[in-house]
Amino acid sequence: MEQAIAVKEVYSIEDLNLWYDKKQALKSIQLTLLEKQVTAIIGPSGCGKSTFLKTLNRMVELEPKVRIEGSVRYRGTGIYDRTYPVEKLRDSVGMVFQKANPFPKTIYNNIAYGPRLRGIKNRRVLNEIVEKSLKQAALWEEVKDILHKEALSLSGGQQQRLCIARCLAIQPDVILMDEPTSALDPISTLKIEELIEELKQSYSIIMVTHNMEQAQRISDRTAFFLEGELVEYRLTEQVFTSPVDKRTEDYIMGKFG
Ligand SMILES: Nc1ncnc2c1ncn2[C@@H]1O[C@H](COP(=O)(O)OP(=O)(O)OP(=O)(O)O)[C@@H](O)[C@H]1O
């Protein structure tokens, strides 16, 4: 008899509500995000995708006049509990943004930055981390001879892979990606998509995307948001081939958004 493989939960979210001042951006969100899967967050502009992503690492608290209610549990512990050590979250949850944002430093120092901040000073250890992270981000071959060049001299696609490598250097558990390829050309996009496929062997990836083909190509599960609500959250194939909610169907058919 086939045995079900238990997939572990990374995040468990219950009745999450969020307001920016008087505007409610997330409404009673309830879902669990699973380990070593790619979860795509889709929906039209302004539906709350980025806000949701930023609740997962508490970055949303940096916005003015934010109020959050409900529970976001990461590996079983509520991250908005007053005693939760936010620095633990910074070590465990990396983030990649829409626009690559390397530091104005060399390629090497971009990657070594996080490990140094965490007390690693030994040059040999740092060299190993830099090489391993760049290899994991499929950038090593292109930059191994120019590690001491400015990161900002790289192409947009290379800069985005560098940002992914910088994120991997701190050995995160989860990687949040906010439209990581929307500023890239098709070839760079393909490279990042292949990379994401590879990374999900070791990391749990939660990715906001406007691109529904991309969600179908690389995600295991898809969550469809609309006006701050989570309308549908199932296996990607099911969402795209047999949506249960009419609003999901209309959205994936391109009737709005
Ligand atoms: N800092 C803020 N202050 C006030 N309102 C905000 C703030 N950030 C976002 N909003 C509002 O909250 C809602 C959700 O925004 P959010 O950026 O999460 O949507 P999104 O789905 O990621 O949109 P897009 O696809 O355009 O990036 C929108 O109505 C937006 O205008």
Image: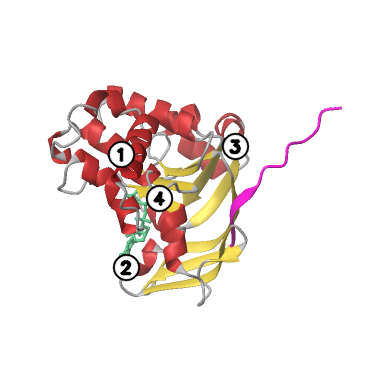
Give the distance between the C-alpha atoms of the residues marked 3 and 1, in whole angstroms.
Answer: 48 Å
Q: Say few, some or many: other residues with alpha carbon within 10 Å of mark 4 (under 14 / 14 to 19 / 20 or more).
A: many
Of the residues under marks 1 and 2, which one precedes in the sequence?
2
Q: Nearer the viewer, mark 4 or mark 2?
A: 4
Q: Is residue 164 above or below residue 17?
A: above
- Residue indicated by mark 2: 63
**Residue drawn at point x = 51 percent, y = 71 percent:** 84
Name which of mark 4 and mark 2 comes first in the sequence: 2
Instruction: Name which residue lies at 37% across and 62% down.
Output: 59
| Cβ at disc 2 under 8 Å from ligand 1 | yes
Label 1 sits on residue: 127
State the residue lying farthest toward the bottom: 82
Residue 209, compared with residue 113, is above or below; it is above
**Residue 55 seen anywhere in this rendered image of the structure:** no
Say left or right for 110 vs 246: left
Which residue type carries mark 1?
A: Asn
Ligand 1's quadrant is: bottom left
Q: Which of the pair 241/186 is nearer the observer?
A: 186
Sequence-earlier tag: 3 or 4: 4
Gap between marks 2 and 3, in whole Å?
Answer: 34 Å
Tell me if the residue at label 4 has its CB under 8 Å from ligand 1: no
Asked whether mark 1 lies closer than 8 Å to ligand 1, one says: no
- Marks 3 and 4 sit apart, C-alpha to C-alpha, by 31 Å
